[in-house]
Image (spheres, helix red, strand yellow):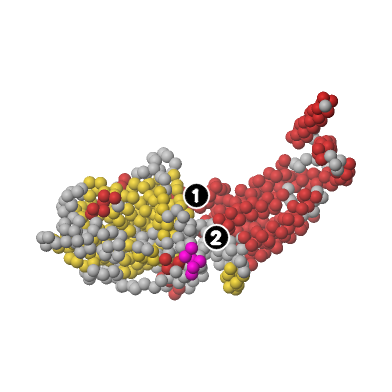
Amino acid sequence: MDKRLPIALLLSIAVFVAWEYFFVPKPPPKRPEPQVAREAPRSEAAGALQVPAAPAAPGAVAPESGEPVLGTLLSESEERLLELRVGTPGKRGSYYAQFSNRGARLVDLRLGDSFDRPKLGLAERADIAHWTRLVRGVSAESGTSGSLAWRATGLSTAYERGALDRALWTMTPLGPAEAPTGVRFELQPGAGVRFQKTVRFRPDSYDLEVELALVNEAASSVGPATFVFTPAEVVPLESGDTMYVEPQAVAAARESAREKLQFAFEQRDDSGSDPSGDFGLPDGKLSFAGVCNKYFAVLARGDSKSAPTVRNASWRRLRDADWAALSPANAAKPWRFLATDIRLQLEVPPVGTSAAWTYLVYAGPKNPDTLAAAHGDFSALLAHDLGFFTSIAHFLLAVLNFFHGVVGNWGVAIILLTLSVRLVLFPLNRRSQTAMARYQAKMKRIQPLIEALKKRYEKDPAKLRQEQTLLMQKEGAFPPLGGCLPMFLQIPVFFGLFSALRASFDLRHAPFALWIHDLARPDELLEINLQLPLIGTIHYFNLLPILMVVLWVLQQRLMPKPTEEQALKMHRMMMIMPVFMGFFLYGYAAGLSLYMITQSTLGIVEQVVIKRFWPLDATELPPKQGGFFAKLAKLQEEQSKKLAAGGATKKKRA
């Protein structure tokens, strides 16, 4: 079992990591954020440059469309940006937001209680340049992208004169200038309906309230109308981790309160082969939809009154024109972002009345407690991140949290978790090691007999297999079935911890010791910016993956060399495998490297110390009668006799 466990673990890691490495899109190089003109917040009394909402003169036509004006005209004459700082920096509910009156969109949103890197001073924490960016704008064919956009679709386009998400809305900040609470947008394009959108930031919360209102001034057509609301159009990459594809468009629906939540997602694909699509969820049952990266999410849902208006959701890819223009290589795969669109069915009210609907947009961390407090169904997002081994990963995270509560250090908690798993499996591991040692001792004893059979039946492979089977049956030289059990138990633990470390928000910016300040990222001991052929630029020297490879190789060398020819070849191959694994895992989270280093160290201690003072009992036991392999060998022997008898009969007939 000692030989099989690292072999199985390394092969499993190789398959998993190779799949991720070769089939997951690589993170693009970072580029400077585009500079935009900024405007200080205005008070509500200051107003904005806008066409006043006054009845249109008889025969007046809308400026953009040239069609007759119904009701009033209300818009702005120029494009501008509005900056808001909301809440208390460093506390929940603190945001920096930048809105554009072009399409009444949110073009930049940063979180004031989360930062782009660990160990920042007070002055750096107060600088919005270090605040975590949740949404941003990129240049696309239709102009700069933006979130919280609202547009008409289908027959509802009759209420607009030009696209709502490209028109120049009026834009007025809410609340006092020193403590703004939101922004209100209004637009009357002259088709009889006035559109109002109000965005409010909830105090001490990651929820934004977005109220959409329709005021019917002169439209004769009333009743159901379809619109599209886009909660998040560009959520930037947060970590650049090649083991986690980001960003992702997500949506969830539930047929009824008793039914299981249905979760759907779409991953980033730089090639843009599928430009858009539907999530395939049941219509009218949508729970939430949005876009997320590794550690943060922007998710929209209707409140208790507006939930019935939420019909379904779809996704579409966005082309980053600015990034594509940087080099010809970028232009080949510029589809770096995803947007989620929610289809709404609203009611245009009778003339002279208005109707409003409120939607909640969660813009914050993928912290389990925070997500669950905001909306119970958000937990599906974390289950999706943990993948196939969700149950195991949840259990391991609970154990990690327990140890962290005791020692206060996530790195030490990982070490204690690894030690605990090893201790729990030690009795079973010891038993399987003993069984394997006895098997190896028996194989070493009968190896000369096997070599003699090979020479005797060198020209008769069928007879050789038959005689080897008889010898194995006589000696009871079959691998113990229980020898593989600890291996099968530890592989799910490894993948569960792999998933947990890959997605756990608690490990973001969690320090361990010395130079390791973030267990969710590579340890980055030194910045080297080394350019290598075929590989590209290595920005940092990561020490932990190197230590991991050294310990793997040392653990392999401490294991006894097998006597069988095929097993010996496998042993030699496994001496090279750690080097390749170190290459694949070089840029992965320091937390995973710490787990593997601890696991290998404990394995070496077991080989060198424990087995020296408590050696394995390799005493051969008499062969068991009627075991599985004995029955298998007997069946093979009977089959060989039948084949031999059949061959003899054919010769007589001939």
Q: Is residue 295 left or right of residue 585?
A: left
Residue 636 circle label: none
- Residue 229 screen position, x and y as percent: 33, 54
CA separation in Å, label 2 and label 1: 19 Å
Q: Is residue 341 left or right of residue 521?
A: left
- Residue 357 screen position, x and y as percent: 28, 52
**Residue that sits furthest to the top in the current view:** 653
Q: Main secondary structure of the magenta part?
A: helix
The three-letter code of the residue at mark 1 reads Ala
Residue 383 circle label: 1
Give the quarter of the image for residue 17.
bottom right
- Residue 25 screen position, x and y as percent: 52, 59
Q: Residue at x 48, y 73 (%)?
A: 121
Give the quarter of the image for residue 97.
bottom left
Q: Is residue 492 visible?
A: yes
Mark closer to the chain start, 2 or 1: 2
Give the quarter of the image for residue 613.
bottom right
**Residue that sits furthest to the front in the current view:** 654
Q: Residue at x 58, y 70 (%)?
A: 537
Secondary element under disc 2, as helix, strand or loop, is loop
Range of residues picked out in magenta = 327-332
Residue that badge 2 annotates: 242
Q: Residue at x 38, y 58 (%)?
A: 232
